[in-house]
Amino acid sequence: MKLILKLKWIAVASVSLIALAGCSNETNQNSTESHEEEAVYEKAQETESVTVQLTMATVTDALQAAGLEIREVAQTESERDWILDHVKPTRYTVCLPTENIVPAKLERVSLYVFDSENARTKGLEDFRKQTAMYDMMMPRMYEIHNVMIFYWSHADMDQTGRYERYFESAVASLSSLSDAA
């Protein structure tokens, strides 16, 4: 009888160990699957957070593709540029290729290319701080990725700027670059 009791205890202990080993293996498998799922999620988050870094050439190409003619302007000492978050703009005149406008009457564009979207946001905050005390004509502003475009239209703010739709088209095409990335 003692032998049968010992055998039962051994059988119960063996079954318990096998069951525990199975649970431990399942836990390890679940843990491995969980780590794999976390890695896939993190990779997806990295992919989503990757932003397109635009260059001056990409922006000017998009403006020209939208139908505008732009020419870089050499800055004179009398002109004041808004340096935003340590970034100085490149200035251009803008018109349609078919227009014959006196150069002094051409509308202007200031293009800021920042290191990141966060820097662009800081640049806009800097612009607002610098201009808060001035009563001035404000530019039409376009923000896309790491770029800020100031379109200095001659039209009042409650009117549509002469080239506004061309800028909107260019910004839409630049925006689509992030969709393709």
Image: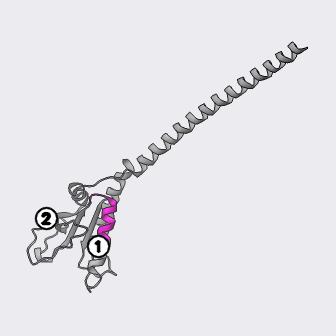
Q: Quadrant of residue 64?
A: bottom left
Residue nearest the viewer, comparing 122 with 104: 122
> What residue is at 19 percent from the left and 72 percent from the top?
108
Classified by dominant secondary structure, the portion drawn in magenta counts as helix
CA gap, disc 1 to disc 2? 24 Å
x and y percentages locating residue 78 in the rendered image: 9, 78
Residue nearest the viewer, comparing 148 with 97: 148
Q: What amino acid does circle 2 point to?
A: Glu
4 on left or right of 82 = right
Residue that mark 2 sits on: 72
Residue contact between numbered discs 1 and 2, judged by CB atoms under 8 Å: no
In the displayed structure, would residue 104 be above or below residue 2?
A: below
Label 2 Cα crowd, 10 Å radius (few <14 / some 14-19 / many 20+) = few
Q: Quick one: quadrant of the N terminus?
A: top right
Q: Quadrant of residue 159?
A: bottom left
Residue 126's disc is 1
Q: Quadrant of residue 150?
A: bottom left
Label 1 Cα crowd, 10 Å radius (few <14 / some 14-19 / many 20+) = some
> What residue is at 32 percent from the left and 72 percent from the top?
125
Residue 144 visible in the picture? no
x and y percentages locating residue 166 in the rendered image: 28, 65
Q: What amino acid does circle 1 point to?
A: Asp
Instruction: List the single residue furthest toward the right.
Output: 1
67 on left or right of 11 = left
Q: Secondary structure at mark 1?
A: helix
Image: magenta residue range:
115-124
